[in-house]
Amino acid sequence: ISGEPAFLERAVVEFSEEYEKKKLIAIGSCGYDSIPADLGAYFTSTIFPSTQLVSLISAYHIVHNASKANFTTYESAVHSMRNSGELASIRKELPTSKVKLEYPGGKRKMTKAGERLENGLYSMPFPGADASVVRRSQATLFLRDKITPAQFQCYFTVGSWFYVMLSALFGMVLMVMTSFPLGVNLLLRFPEFFSGGFFSRDGPSHEQLDKSTFEMRFVAEGWNSASESSPGKPTRKVVTTFAGAMDPFYRFTAVAAVASARCILEERSKVPFGVHTPTVALRNTSILDRLRKRGIKIQVVSDTQI
């Protein structure tokens, strides 16, 4: 259930080949990081007649009533930022390092930070593992099965410009403080101060968890047929949702981890050996149906021509 890209990708480099030979299975990021993003993006791409007809998938985290989070989540974010400098060298050793992803319709312009969305919320680039996990899934599936990737971008959302500025300030503080050892020590020693009270060693109460819900909304643009895709501009927009009436960070993570483990145990023949992302490992299993049975909504919201 790790959400640290350096740790996840180092595990692939160090263990994937050995696990394949010994017929072992390891799946990283099987919690809120990054089951909704990875499987949700793959699910969304399957709504189109072919993955070659999907140009862009934008994903938006929407969390309601999350008033407090545990110190370990904060600690993971600090170490992730601290170790981000290692990623370039680690990625050169990945099995997919030589894969050059080319997106249908070419590379698209990303949503701007602080842009107001149709639902009235504001978008901010999501600094977590989701984008790196999805892109690693895409590169692996292209390398193994020639499945064409769509350009993917991931955001979290806030309710006003005040929180846009506050989020940007927190991001800058985290970036500066994680650049030197003393800063890391201060961040880890005083999480309440640096996060404005959102992260604490006490974590959220059961009452706070009961009020929290989440949705990850995907907006995909593409075409209905190859003849439409030739001009370049998308003609179809599909919106999907991956949502739950439960706390995402703790309760959904537990649900997702157990569902993933049961897929490995009960559907072993459908899960490839090695160290994989959720989509690469579980896309041929009943993982989405298992999550739906636990109350998670994974469905199409709208499908329109643009």
Image: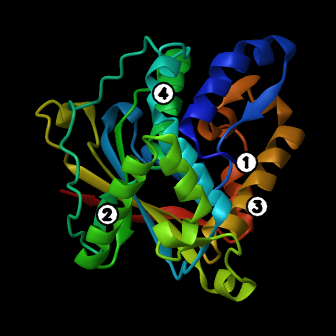
- SS at mark 4 in the image: helix
Q: CA distance from mark 3 to mark 2?
A: 31 Å
Left or right: 3 as drawn, with respect to 171? right
Q: Amino acid at mark 2?
A: Leu
Q: Closer to us: mark 1 or mark 3?
A: 3
Label 1 neighbour load within 10 Å: few <14, some 14-19, many 20+: some
Residue nearest the viewer, comparing 40 with 111? 111
Colour mode? Answer: rainbow
Residue 292 appears at what percent x and percent y? 68, 64
Residue 169, label in figure: 2
Residue 71 spot, x, y in % from top left: 65, 64
Q: Is residue 201 left or right of residue 139?
A: right
* Disc 4 residue type (three-letter): Leu
Q: Do callouts 4 and 2 mark residues in contact (Cβ within 8 Å)? A: no
Amino acid residing under circle 3: Ala
Q: Are marks 3 and 2 in contact (CB under 8 Å)?
A: no
Say which label, 4 or 2, has the lower sequence index.
Answer: 4
CB within 8 Å, label 1 to label 3: no
Label 4 vs label 1, nearer the camera? 4
Residue 254 tag number: 3
Q: Name the residue: 56% across, 66% down.
A: 191
Could you tell which of marks 4 and 3 lies nearer the N-terminus? 4
